[in-house]
Amino acid sequence: MKLQGKVAIVTGASSGIGAGIAKALGAAGATVIVNYATSKSGADAVVSAIKQAGGAALAVQADMSKAADVARLFDAVKPFGQLDVLVNNAGFAIFEMVADLTEEAFHKQFNVNVLGYFLAIREAVKHFGESGGSIINISSILSTDPYLASSVYAATKGAVDTMTFALARELGPRRIRVNSILPGHTNTPATDGNFAGEFGEKLIAGTPLGRFGEPEDIAPVAVFLASDDAHWVTGESLRASGGVRGVGY
């Protein structure tokens, strides 16, 4: 119970990596605010799973690219006193060649993946106490090793990693640690179908541990970064990729 008595917000937590992290934080003792944008049923299922395991959780809807929604999400912290952990996970991806990408697709990816993280962090710093806290930004190995048709998505994740390092310096004096996790090729509803066929076979062949990741592979890394075990870890971008280097094939 490394997070007993802690309060955490996980954005984009109705499925996939976010759901896995929310459940793991709950199992470690944290009270978890499960954010969702559209899938109330998914968020409710995550809350139910946390409660059935003996934890505490509630679901709160918010579009993380809208400042008013983000402020409302963080209002949910007030009954618990203060925030201890923020996991920025809400994301949006369109994988298309640059000739086919629209301005709308460009802006939506940056609005959710970068602006959304910024808005959440800006609110979070108002709710951390004197003891500080932990901010965990979910990035991607594509931030350093983009593959074909990922240019804009990869750029958003590169921005996340740079923002992570910059904010670790800025917020360190307040005992707020800021780190990012770079998952590798991970099976989630959002990636369903993306890893099919020969492309998927090449990705697995380029992964030293020989398989795709699962949300449950990423979640323990987040628990570590959220806990006091990581009290001396900030400004880091930690790969959780099964050993992938390059694009994995």
Image (spheres, rainbow, N blue to C red):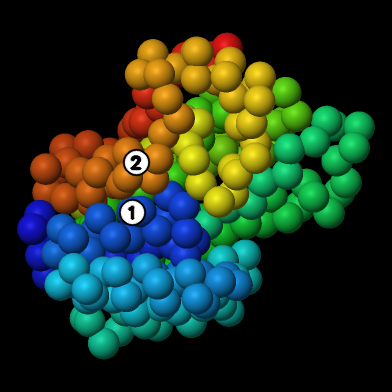
Mark 2 lies on a secondary structure that is helix
Mark 1–mark 2 contact, CB under 8 Å?
yes
Residue type pointed to by label 1 = Ile
Report x, y in % for residue 190: 59, 49
The reply, left or right, for residue 127 in relation to residue 244 is left
Quarter of the rendering containing residue 1: bottom left
The reply, left or right, for residue 150 in relation to residue 224 is right
Q: Nearer the viewer, residue 133 or 206?
A: 206
The reply, left or right, for residue 229 in relation to residue 32 is left
Q: Which residue is mark 1?
A: 21
Report x, y in % for residue 60: 45, 79
* Above or below for 41 versus 143: below
What label does residue 218 carry, if any?
A: 2
What label does residue 31 carry, if any?
A: none
The reply, left or right, for residue 36 in relation to residue 131 is right
Residue lying at 22% horizontally and 64% vertically, measured from the top left: 26
Residue lying at 83% horizontally and 54% vertically, measured from the top left: 104
Residue 73 seen from this side: no
Report x, y in % for residue 133: 24, 57
Residue lying at 36% horizontally and 49% vertically, measured from the top left: 136
Residue lying at 42% horizontally and 76% vertically, measured from the top left: 44
Quick one: label 1 or label 2, which is nearer the N terminus?
A: 1
* Above or below for 196 versus 9: above
| Quadrant showing the C terminus | top right
Considering every residue shown, the one lying at the far right of the view is: 99
Residue type pointed to by label 2 = Ile
